[in-house]
Image (cartoon, rainbow, N blue to C red):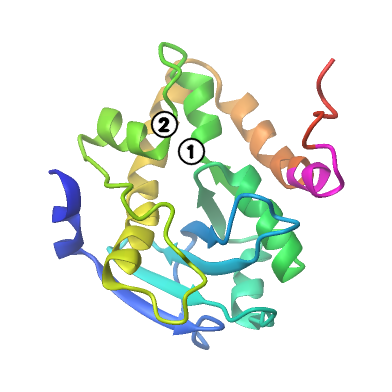
């Protein structure tokens, strides 16, 4: 399966400012964020993508400085719901800075990949989807203007695909972590990620507080 053929199997629902009341996405939710840039202290949150792993993607679009979103915050802080990210360190910092909540518990496919796929240095989402699932992701819209008032259909499709495959990636990576005896250390890393993001927000992103 290649390119945008996955869109045919995906239902995209766009919401303004928050998730709908009483929406249940299940016990494991894939999450991604689109921002105006890559600096959480400078660049605002524009879009949050979420999927319960059933082929339905919910997109929450934000206006500048309008981050109340009680339903979304409730989901992010629900200890019964595992949130899957790819490169959670960045998204958690954005969520903490823009929405004012600590998102946990979390799972990061990038961290998991680095711990069990030590035969490669390619741990991007596109690489994981290709190597583990045989799916080619398009990253054409990666540098789009996510702050636009009206997002283009191709932007919505790109954003949705960033969470569409995270549940399947987690299953494959869990098997590899277990096989290599690194599940426990992965869990410890996942628990530390909200604090790692907090260090970034406090200025210890560069130089890294954990470096020599």
- In the rendered image, residue 127 lying in the magenta stretch gets the answer no
Viewer-nearest of labels 1 and 2? 1
Spot occupied by residue 32 in the image (x, y as percentages of width and height): 50, 57
The answer to whether any part of residue 104 appears in the image is no
Q: What secondary structure is marked by label 2?
A: helix
**As displayed, is residue 98 above or below residue 178?**
below
Q: Residue at x 80, y 48 (%)?
A: 198
Q: Position of residue 40 (x, y in %)?
A: 70, 55
Report which quarter residue 135 is drawn in.
top left
How far apart marks 1 and 2 lie (CA) works out to 7 Å
Secondary structure category for the residue under label 1: helix
Label of residue 109 in the image: 1
- Write the residue at 59% across / 81% down: 63
Residue at 55% x, 82% y is 18
200 within the magenta span: yes
**Which disc is residue 173 wearing?**
2
The reply to whether discs 1 and 2 touch (Cβ–Cβ < 8 Å) is yes
Q: Position of residue 72 (x, y in %)?
A: 59, 74
Badge 1 or badge 2: first in the primary sequence: 1
The residue shown at (41%, 11%) is 119
Residue nearer the viewer, 105 or 62:
62
Marks counted in the figure total: 2
Name the residue at the top extreme.
119
């Amino acid at each position: 399966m290649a390119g945008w053929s996955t869109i045919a199997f995906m239902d995209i629902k766009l919401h303004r400012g928050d998730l709908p009341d009483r929406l249940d996405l299940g016990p494991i939710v894939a999450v991604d964020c689109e921002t105006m840039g890559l600096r959480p202290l400078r660049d605002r949150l524009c879009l949050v993508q979420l999927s319960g792993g059933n082929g339905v993607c919910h997109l929450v679009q934000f206006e500048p400085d309008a981050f109340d979103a009680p339903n979304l915050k409730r989901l992010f802080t629900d200890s019964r719901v595992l949130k899957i990210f790819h490169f959670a360190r960045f998204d958690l910092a954005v969520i903490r800075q823009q929405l004012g909540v600590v998102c946990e518990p979390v799972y990061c496919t990038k961290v998991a990949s680095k711990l069990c796929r030590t035969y490669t240095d390619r741990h991007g989402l596109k690489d994981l989807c290709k190597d583990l699932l045989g799916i080619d992701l398009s990253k054409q819209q990666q540098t789009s203007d996510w702050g636009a008032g009206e997002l283009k259909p191709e932007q919505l499709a790109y954003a949705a695909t960033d969470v569409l495959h995270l549940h399947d990636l987690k299953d494959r990576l869990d098997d590899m972590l277990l096989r290599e005896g690194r599940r426990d250390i992965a869990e410890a890393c996942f628990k530390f990620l909200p604090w790692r993001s907090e260090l970034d927000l406090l200025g210890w992103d560069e130089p890294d507080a954990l470096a020599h």
